[in-house]
Image (cartoon, grey):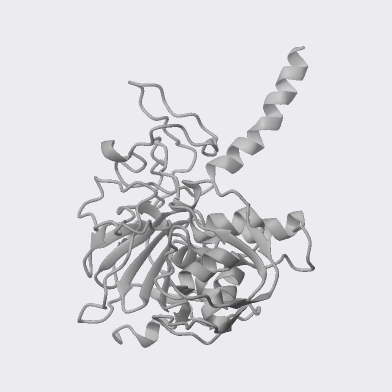
């Protein structure tokens, strides 16, 4: 019996050592606390993922990890408060799209394009594109309209593009293309979106569904905001990380890029440049080597669109919308100092650098995007 317990204890030791070496991300103070008016009235259907370490009981201090005390390394703990659900997990999507055949519709007196869409089951935008109609979509009685067939999902308030894509096992980028969605990519309640068939037709395989669930920056930027009701306005930016917007709040960026352009988010050495790498991989930004816990500054005025670690490769991540189609991305952070929906100023500290995600060293992954297109940051930053 004693020998068996000894062997079991020895087997666990390597696992404990491995866990101690995994970089962790520290969230802002209060991260995960919903404002009183935004707390859900009933529990979510899908509980959040369980943590490896249970939170401390009330009155107890968080356990301290002393397993890695290398000089210069941030050994701060992830807060034990529950992280807020990403917007795309706040409302479950029912995959109840209706499939309609391709048909021709003869416009009746008093018809509007919206009424034609409701009668046919297709989306207003799809009918407009199929018939080369432009806003305000004027149609005449007796006119024959082509109704494009396909699977149409009717969006409900609070649903996000990412959640819709996951429900059908289709990559969100394919839905964006199929529906010709454009910035700011915020869906509307009761809008219909065309759901492309899975590759090869039929029900998607497990690997196809897994691929559809793999997030990237483009997904978050184009499919991360909840659908607005017709009488609902986007949330006003918050001024401090002490307040947390509810997951169903829609966050939009400024209308235009503030004067002054972009500044370098950190002072350091560029160790990986924009574009294809030596092994064929593509880098959508640059990697800047900096000491651990270096302050990371907002490259320009903007509104925080995302804070978290939902993209494994980038670890602690902040995304800021700047207006005019511009977005900046800050990855590998060890500590996150802002909240989704927070207004930030050029040069404001938004995070501390780290080696989280797939970082090779303490470094910052920094991107600039214009619309959906990554832009070489060095072409927009002051020359040092």
Residue visible at 42% across and 78% down? 371
- Quadrant where the C terminus is found in the figure: bottom left
Asked where in the image residue 292 lies, by quadrant, the reply is bottom left
Residue 229: x and y in percent read 38, 56
Furthest residue toward top: 1
The answer to whether one can see residue 266 in this image is: no
Q: In this rendering, would 169 be left or right of 314?
A: right
Asked where in the image residue 351 lies, by quadrant, the reply is bottom left
Asked where in the image residue 214 lies, by quadrant, the reply is bottom right
- Quadrant where the N terminus is found in the figure: top right
Which is nearer the eye, 19 or 378? 378
The answer to whether one can see residue 37 in this image is: yes
**As drawn, 381 above or below 98:** below
Furthest residue toward front: 109
Q: In this rendering, would 248 be left or right of 301?
A: right
Residue 338: x and y in percent read 30, 54
Which is nearer the eye, 71 or 271? 271
Which is nearer the eye, 353 or 54? 54
Residue visible at 40% across and 68% down? 329
Q: How many marks?
A: 0
Residue 314: x and y in percent read 50, 61
Which is nearer the eye, 289 or 226? 226
Q: In this rendering, would 119 be left or right of 365?
A: right
Residue visible at 26% across and 78% down? 257
**As drawn, 35 above or below 206:** above
């Amino acid at each position: 019996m004693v020998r068996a317990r000894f062997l079991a204890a020895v087997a666990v030791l390597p696992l404990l050592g491995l866990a101690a070496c995994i970089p962790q991300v520290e969230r802002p103070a209060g991260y995960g606390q919903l404002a009183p008016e935004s707390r859900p009235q009933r529990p979510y259907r899908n509980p959040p993922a369980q943590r490896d370490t249970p939170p401390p009981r009330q009155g107890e201090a968080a356990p301290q990890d002393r397993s890695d005390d290398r000089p210069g390394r941030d050994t701060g703990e992830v807060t034990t408060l529950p992280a807020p659900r990403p917007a795309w997990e706040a409302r479950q999507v029912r995959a109840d799209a209706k499939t309609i055949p391709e048909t021709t519709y003869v416009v009746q007196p008093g018809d509007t394009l919206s009424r034609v869409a409701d009668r046919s089951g297709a989306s207003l935008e799809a009918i407009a594109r199929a018939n080369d109609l432009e806003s305000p979509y004027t149609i005449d009685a007796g006119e024959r309209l082509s109704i494009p067939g396909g699977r149409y999902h009717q969006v409900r308030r609070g649903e996000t593009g990412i959640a819709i894509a996951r429900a059908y096992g289709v990559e969100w980028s394919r839905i964006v293309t199929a529906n010709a969605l454009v910035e700011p990519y915020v869906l509307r309640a009761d809008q219909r979106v065309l759901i492309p068939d899975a590759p090869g037709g039929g029900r998607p395989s497990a690997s196809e569904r897994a691929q559809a669930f793999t997030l990237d920056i483009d997904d978050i930027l184009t499919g991360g905001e909840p659908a607005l009701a017709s009488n609902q306005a986007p949330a006003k930016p918050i001024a401090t990380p002490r307040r947390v917007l509810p997951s169903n709040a829609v966050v939009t960026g400024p209308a235009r890029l503030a004067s002054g352009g972009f500044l370098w988010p950190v002072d350091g050495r560029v160790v990986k440049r924009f574009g294809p790498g030596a092994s064929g991989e593509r880098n959508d930004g640059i990697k800047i080597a900096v000491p651990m816990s270096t302050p990371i500054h907002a490259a320009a005025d903007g509104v925080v669109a995302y804070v978290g670690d939902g993209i494994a490769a980038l670890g602690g991540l902040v995304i800021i919308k700047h207006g005019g189609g511009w977005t900046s991305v800050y990855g590998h952070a060890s500590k996150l100092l802002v909240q989704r929906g927070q207004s930030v100023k050029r040069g404001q500290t938004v995070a501390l650098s780290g080696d989280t995600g797939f970082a090779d060293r303490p470094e910052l992954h920094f991107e600039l995007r214009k619309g959906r297109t990554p832009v070489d940051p060095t072409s927009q930053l002051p020359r040092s």
